[in-house]
Image (cartoon, helix red, strand yellow):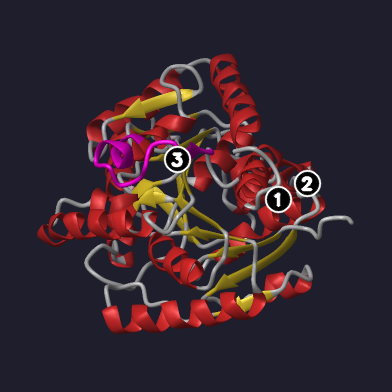
Amino acid sequence: AEMPPIKVWHIGGEDVRFRLPLLLALRRRGFDVGAVGSEEGGGFRRDNVPYWRYTLVRRLSPLADLKTIRQLHRLFAEHRPDVIHAFDTKPTILAPAAAARAGVPGRVSTITGMGYVFSSNSPLALALRPAYRLMQTWAARSTGITIFQNSDDREYFLRKRMVRPGRDRLVRGSGIDIEEMLRTRPSQEDLLALRRELKLDGRPVVTMIARLVAEKGVREYLEAAGRVRKERPDTVFLLVGPAESEGSRAVPIEEVRRKAGDVLYLGPRSDVPAILGVSDLFVLPSYYREGVPRVLLEAGAAGLPLVATQMPGCRDVVKDGWNGLLVPPRDAGRLAAAILRMLGASREEREAMGSRARSHVLEHFGLERVADAYAEIYEALAGRSAI
């Protein structure tokens, strides 16, 4: 008799929709896919992917977390997936335990970076590190395979014995949908219209896309823009992304507006491919511990040379001097110098770096490559192949 397809669920938080292209790629490979998240989930219904919503509280809250584990346990016990795959900090800690109790044979977690606790040196972040280590070590006991998106995170977990050797894998990023990028590539008319709208004609354009939070390096970018424009006043600096209202880590919109002479803040935009299309250089001075910054991959895939920080995740995308430049985190002076160096390079050199960035992303971070790696892990955990 023919084996039924392996039922795989992806478990995430309020942006679980980013896993949709990956789930569709897995469905094309014959998996029966579904997702559980804390957001609305309209996109899943459009693509006919079963979706369940659960309650997930981002902050530390034992009572809320117990409620979450119970909800997940009920879902898993009722629908019996063969493999659950959790993404983001909270789900990777809570979902494997719920799945183990419900008898789900395949339990996978992807560590999508180590977040605020390892990005900030605030007393709170430092105090939370031992708790994070303890919870991840506890979660790993219920997890079959822990997947890392960059080698630094993997090293750290192995060194601190937070994951058992042999139960770890490196799969870079969550897969950039190159085909989709080619399909939705902006036309020359769109690019001309955008250049006119933003008055960019013939001027070098430097772009950063991020939420307005301190650890994405927004302040360093604003500061570096002022320094660069003293030497090259024709340079246009674009900043794209939503303002954050929450907490001490938000960079207030007034602070960004004070730099309006140097940086054009466009807010969140739905035409990111076109923005990348009119840019000459992409900058991400983040000191946030991400798995692999998605926006850096998108900019690389768009063929832009990159300037980023010597941080886990960024280092996996940018090879210093080859497809861009790496600078120390939290250093606006070095950031400005790197931007000036890139703007001072010949157009040929910038284009060569951009095309290397593009081929590096296509080769190592493409959606199909990630889907193949995940498929192999799921088959092994569901007992359909050797691990």
Question: What's the mark number on residue 193?
Answer: 1
- Residue denoted by label 3: 168
Residue 96 left/right relative to 64:
right
Residue 166 left/right relative to 254:
right
Percent across and percent down for residue 137 are: 30, 54
Residue 206 magenta-drawn? no
Q: Report how far apart the C-alphas of labels 2 and 1 lie in the structure.
A: 6 Å
Residue 170 magenta-drawn? yes
Q: Which of the pair 327/314 is nearer the observer?
A: 314
First in sequence: mark 3 or mark 2? 3
Q: Is residue 48 above or below residue 373?
A: below
Residue 259 seen: no
Q: Identify the element where label 3 is drawn.
A: strand
Q: Report how far apart the C-alphas of labels 3 and 2 lie in the structure.
A: 47 Å
Front of the two marks 3 and 1? 3
The magenta stretch is: 155-171
Question: What's the mark number on residue 189?
Answer: 2
First in sequence: mark 3 or mark 1? 3
Within 10 Å of the Cα at label 3, are there few (<14), some (14-19), or many (20+) other Cα atoms? Answer: some
Mark 2 in CB contact with mark 1 (< 8 angstroms): yes
User: What's the residue type where badge 3 is placed?
Assistant: Asp
Q: Report how far apart the C-alphas of labels 3 and 1 lie in the structure.
A: 48 Å
Residue 290 seen: yes
* Residue at image location 47% in from the left, 72% down from the top: 101
User: What's the residue type where badge 2 is placed?
Assistant: Glu
Res 246 quadrant in image: bottom left
Q: Is residue 38 above or below residue 169?
A: below
Within 10 Å of the Cα at label 2, are there few (<14), some (14-19), or many (20+) other Cα atoms? Answer: few
Q: Identify the element where label 1 is drawn.
A: helix
Residue sticking out furthest to the front: 1
Q: Is residue 107 above or below residue 175?
A: below
